[in-house]
Structure formats: structure tokens, C-alpha cells
Amino acid sequence: MAIYHLSMQNMARTEGRSAIACASYRSGEELYDIIDGVTHTPKRADRVAHAEIIAPSYAPEWVKNRGKLWNGVEANEKRKDARFAREFQVALPNELDLEQQKELIRDWANEELTPHGLVSDFAIHLVPAGGVQNDHAHIMVTPRAIQTDGSWSKKKDTKFEKKQMLQQWRASWADHANAALEKAGKDAQIDHRSNRIRGIQTLPTIHEGFAAQKIEQKGGLSWKVELNRMIRESNVGIIASIKAKYQEMAKGLAGLQARIAAAAIADQKKKEEQAQKLAEDTLAKNTILAENQKRTAFAQWLENDRKKTAQANALADAQRAADAIERKKNDEQAQKLAADTLETNKRIAEAEAQAKKTAEDAAMVIKRKAYDEAQAKKRAAEEQNKEIALAQARKHALEEQNQRHARSQEMDRKRDQAKAEKAAAEAAELNKKLVQPEAPKRPDDTASREVTPASIMQPPPMRPDKLGQEPTPAAQTMAPKKDEPALAPLQPKSEPTKAPEMPPPAIIDVGAEAEKRKKAADLQAWIQGGGGGGVGGR
């Protein structure tokens, strides 16, 4: 028999619940909790007849993966009191088969939840053969809407927290269930309204549930089933008694309403008198306040004028004191200048005498300097010739090394391009063969990362060239030579192997050796000449 039942509850972190554990139990699927590092295995998976995820058409493909969906929801809800799901429990009409029950849930979710961007994960539970008939479904709904770019909305929609929204969902479920029953050619109908609203005088029974029915089936006694039995048997007498009490209560309520109305009128009159008195007091206070503000403004003006006069007098006194200090400073500077002039004249005389002596010494120095300059020019010319020869040798060696390096780069680039194209083709073929993604693993498990063409084609890290040229990709130095075997396929998170670097060509500094020999020869000549002129004179 078709019955109506729709209840809603929030799943919160403060209750010690986990979205991964709840989704695993309801869907009958083993799920891995990335945050807690726990794998949840359902115990009654045989009761799950069907599990499915309903998402907006623009949602990314990963939303259809139950593990990624609820792990993503829990990672996004960071508050310690966050609610990570809203769950609906609905009773499914027994008159409908499994396919019709699936269609009923899809129609209701696509009308009430999906248009708001919410993702629904529902599971249909059926009791095994021989048990009590109790077809029902669990519908877990994300707390936030999914955006077109695959991210969750920054704010939760508060309209879903209102009681009116729950009433709308209850009425909508009744309408969809009745439409499904009518479409299946069944006469049964359900109604979400209470007996009082529907005008039915009989007392409503309570929801017995699967556990209570199973106790009765085993020969036990359930208080819920017994209470419903007593309600059905006693409905006639209870209704008459309730009607009499209701009439008495109605009379008492009418008198109470009259007293409440009189009290309300008296209270309103009292409030009006208080408001009038408050208005008069406020007017008097405002008048006094305005007068005080005027007096305060005048007093402030007088105080500001007094401060301005005092500041002007203080500024004039400071200016007079500054002028006196400036005059005194000028006099002291004049006296110091006269003394400095006298001292300068004395020093000039001494300098003239010293200059005369220096001129005599300079004549001797000039002779020595002339010889030293001639020797220095000669050595400089020799050194310049040696440097030019050395520079030409280095330039020739550098050009040869650059040519070898350019040819090596071109060969490495062609070989890496061929390897990348082959690896991309293999990765694309592997992705096509995958029917269902593996269960999510811990973030540090590198084996769970998928190798995609994008990851393979990512450019390798750059390293500077020793010869000062443009940086060369490290991958180009790793490529195998023409006759070497092909390298193994690229693996994620592996460090690229660096090719052995060629040592720079050995260059002998001929100029430095010649300079050393030259200095030794000059020193020997100076010693033999008695230490006069040449090297010793410098």
C-alpha cells in the first residue's frame, strides 16, 4: 500500500558524522576518506537496489564520481560546525517497480534541486526477499551549488533553511508520486497534509518504520504497532470525546480572546500616553541642547581667538631672538675669517719655500720617470700583443664549441619531439581504455596520478649554459643518441636525468707566463746594474 513519508535532516560535522561514511552506507559503495585516511566499507550493500548521482548539465565530469564529490564537499566546508549535506528520506510506493521508482526520484530532483545548481546523490533500499516490504530512498544533497567552472558557490542559499521550503518539497513529492502512480495505472494516492487540514476526524496513526514491522513479523510486540492498533479501534469514541472537549475549549477561547482584546486596547492607550509624554520630554531636551550648543560654539570661538593671538606673539618673539643669534653668528664668522686669512698667508710663504725645494727634487725625478715611462710603454706594447693573440685563440675555441653545442641541441630537440608525440599517443590510448576511474587514494600516493598528454608535453626545467648562451631545456641534454636504446616512458613526479656536461676547453694563459719571465729578467738586470734606474727606480 502506498504511504506518504518525507523527512529531511542536516548532516553536520558537530555530530561526528562524515559525508564519506554516509554516502558509502547509502550507496553500498566502498569509499576512501582522503582527510581521515579511512576506507569505508558498507555492511548491508545487498539492500541497495540502485545508486545514482544527479547533477546540472554544466557540471564537470568528476561530480559523477561519488568519492571525489563528497571528498570535495568536506574539503570545501572548513568550519568545525559546518553542514556538509542535506538528506531527504522518502517512502517509495510499493505499487511501482524499480524502474518507475528511479524515474520518480529523477523527476522530483530535476524539478526541485537541480535548477538551483545542487547535486543529488540518491540510493534506493529494498528489503531482501522474505522481509517486510519497506521500499524507501535516501537522497543526499550538497549544501552549495556547483558553478559552471567546477567550483562551489561562495555562499549558501538561505531560502533552503526556511520552513516554507520544506513544505513546498513535501507537497511536490506527493504530486510527483501521485503522477507516477496514475501513469502506472494504479488507483492508490498519497497526501502530505494532516488529517485536520484534510477535514478527517479520525486520529492519525504514527510512522511505524521497518524495525517495528519486523518485530511484529517475528511474533514480538512493538509499541508503535500496538499504538496504531489501539488508535484504529478507539477512533470512534475518541472523536466524540474530542468534539465535546473542543467545543468547551472553543467557548473558553472566545472569552479569553475578548479579555485579550480589552487588555490590548488598554495597553495601546497606555502606550500612546507614554509616547506623547516622551515626545514632550524630547522636545524640551532638544531645546536645552540647542541652547547649550550655541553657548559652547561661542566659547570655542573665544578660545580659538585667544590661542591665535598667543601664537602670533610667540612667533614675533622667536623671530627677534633668531635675528639676534644671526647677527652674533655673523660677527664670529668675520673674526674667524680674519684669523684664517693671516694663517693662510703664513702657510703660502712656507709653501713657496717648499715648492722651490720640490722643484729641485722634481728635476731629478723627471729623469728617472722618463726612463721608467719608456720601459713601461715597451712592456705595455708587448703585453697588448700577447693579449691580442690570446683573445684570438679563445675566440677560435669558443666558436668551435658553440658549433658543437648547436648541433647537439638540434639533435636533442628532434629526438625529444618524437618521444613526446609517441608518449602522448600512448597516454590517449590508455585513457580511452579506462571505463571507470579508480577509487581516490591519499594525496601522497604518486601512483594514483594519471599520466595525460598535458603532463607529458609540459616543458622541462631550464638550466643556464656554461658558455653564456641562451638557457637550454634540461630534457634536451637527456635524449639518447642515435644508436642508443629508447628511454623508458616518463613517470609522474620523477626528476629528469641530467646529461653529462662537457668541460670547457683547456686554455693556457700564454701572456701570464711571458709576463712572469719578463719580470724575472728585469729584476736580474737591475741587480747586475747596481740597483740604479730600471726596475729599482720605480
Image: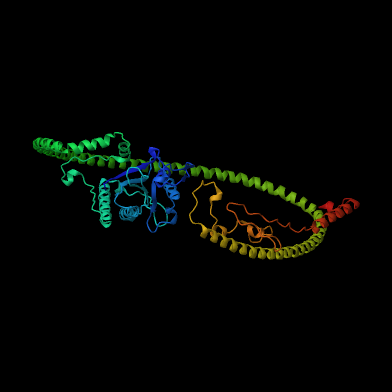
* x, y percent for residue 197: 18, 45
- Image quadrant in which you'd find residue 294: top left
* x, y percent for residue 419: 62, 62
* x, y percent for residue 233: 19, 37
Q: Is residue 267 left or right of residue 333?
A: left
Q: Is residue 26 above or below residue 380?
A: above
Taking the image as drawn, is residue 11 in sight? Answer: yes
Report the colour scheme.
Answer: rainbow
Say which of 235 and 402 sits in front: 235
Q: Is residue 250 left or right of residue 419?
A: left
Say which of 364 and 112 sits in front: 112
Q: Is residue 387 above or below residue 73?
A: below
Q: Is residue 480 above or below residue 70?
A: below
- Image quadrant in which you'd find residue 383: bottom right
* x, y percent for residue 291: 20, 40
Taking the image as drawn, is residue 308 in sight? Answer: no
Q: How many marks?
A: 0
Give the residue drawn at x 56%, y 49%. Answer: 446
Name the residue at the right extreme: 528
